[in-house]
Image (cartoon, grey):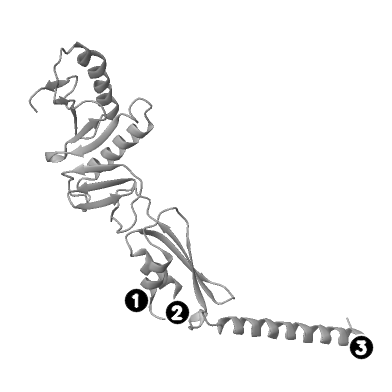
């Protein structure tokens, strides 16, 4: 088809407009890539306070180096994310930049499920069994288990830790026991013991398994054994053995 002069002029003008628009976009993109980082914005996606915005700024200054005044397109966002996730309390991080020259960082901290206290030494675990340290100025409101805590750093006692998690979950969800258990402690060999808010008995759970059945035994102790006592105070109630409740006055 033969084009008329008007068509030729129209398509030529259209080509020039397209070329000009492309150049404009290229200039904008070039301008964006040359934009310098002017500041940092840190966002936290959870309620915990193991790290603060000041901590993140200080960590980047020490480990990454200068970022303010650096071209946005030269910032190594992947490296920043990897460095932050090397901190034990950071479960996930995401870094990105915006056209206003701001480096944005989003932080998800680990959610503690339990706090273990072994003398002066303490640590948290999350629900995956991951161990991470206590914080100097922030304490998470989670159940505390004290005493001769087994070594949880190498995964050998992961089943034990999971059992203790199940124990605290059971107590927290139980209308009968939630407000009665005062303390959870660990004796020699990792044996778990309970102290109730009333009475002086130590309820020896032993290995933290068969939780519901063992609490059933505690219920039987209160409903059948304790009422039959005549001014007798047991010091320990052993629930470790199948279909047995062993009460002792001496230990």
Front: mark 2 or 3: 2
Residue under numbered circle 1: 62
Residue under numbered circle 3: 5
Residue 143: x and y in percent read 31, 42
What is the C-alpha distance between the residues marked 3 and 1?
A: 67 Å
Going 30% across and 40% down the picture, which residue do you hit? 165
Residue 16: image quadrant is: bottom right
Is 86 or 168 nearer to us in this picture? 168
Looking at marks 3 and 1 on the same chain, the residue that comes earlier in the sequence is marked by: 3
Residue under numbered circle 2: 67
Going 20% across and 45% down the picture, which residue do you hit? 157
How many numbered marks does the figure carry?
Answer: 3
Quick check: 243 above or below 83? above
Is 225 or 70 nearer to us in this picture? 225
Q: Of all residues shown, which one is farthest toward the front?
A: 231
Residue 133: x and y in percent read 27, 56
Per the image, label 1 sits on a secondary structure element best described as helix
Can residue 98 be seen in the rendering of this structure? yes
Going 28% across and 31% down the picture, which residue do you hit? 181
What is the C-alpha distance between the residues marked 2 and 3?
A: 56 Å
């Amino acid at each position: 088809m033969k084009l008329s002069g008007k068509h030729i002029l129209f398509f030529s003008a259209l080509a020039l407009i397209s070329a000009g628009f492309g150049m404009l976009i290229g200039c904008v993109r070039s301008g964006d890539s040359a934009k310098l980082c002017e500041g940092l914005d840190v966002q936290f996606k959870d309620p915990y306070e193991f790290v603060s915005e000041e901590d993140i700024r200080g960590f980047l200054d020490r480990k990454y180096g200068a970022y303010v005044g650096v071209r946005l397109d030269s910032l190594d966002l992947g490296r920043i994310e990897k460095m932050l996730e090397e901190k034990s309390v950071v479960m996930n991080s995401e870094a990105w930049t915006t056209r206003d020259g701001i480096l944005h960082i989003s932080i998800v901290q680990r959610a503690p499920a339990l706090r273990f206290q072994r003398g002066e030494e303490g640590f948290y675990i999350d629900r995956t069994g991951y161990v991470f340290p206590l914080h100097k100025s922030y304490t998470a409101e989670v159940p505390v288990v004290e005493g001769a805590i087994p070594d949880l750093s190498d995964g050998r006692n992961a089943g034990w830790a999971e059992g203790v998690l199940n124990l605290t979950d059971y107590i927290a969800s139980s209308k009968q026991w939630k407000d009665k258990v005062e303390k959870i402690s660990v004796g020699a060999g990792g044996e778990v013991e309970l102290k109730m808010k009333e009475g002086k008995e130590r309820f020896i759970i032993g290995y933290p398994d068969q939780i519901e059945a063992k609490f059933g035994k505690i219920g039987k102790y209160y409903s059948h054994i304790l009422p039959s006592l005549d001014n007798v105070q047991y010091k320990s109630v052993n629930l470790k053995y199948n279909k047995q409740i062993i009460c002792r006055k001496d230990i």
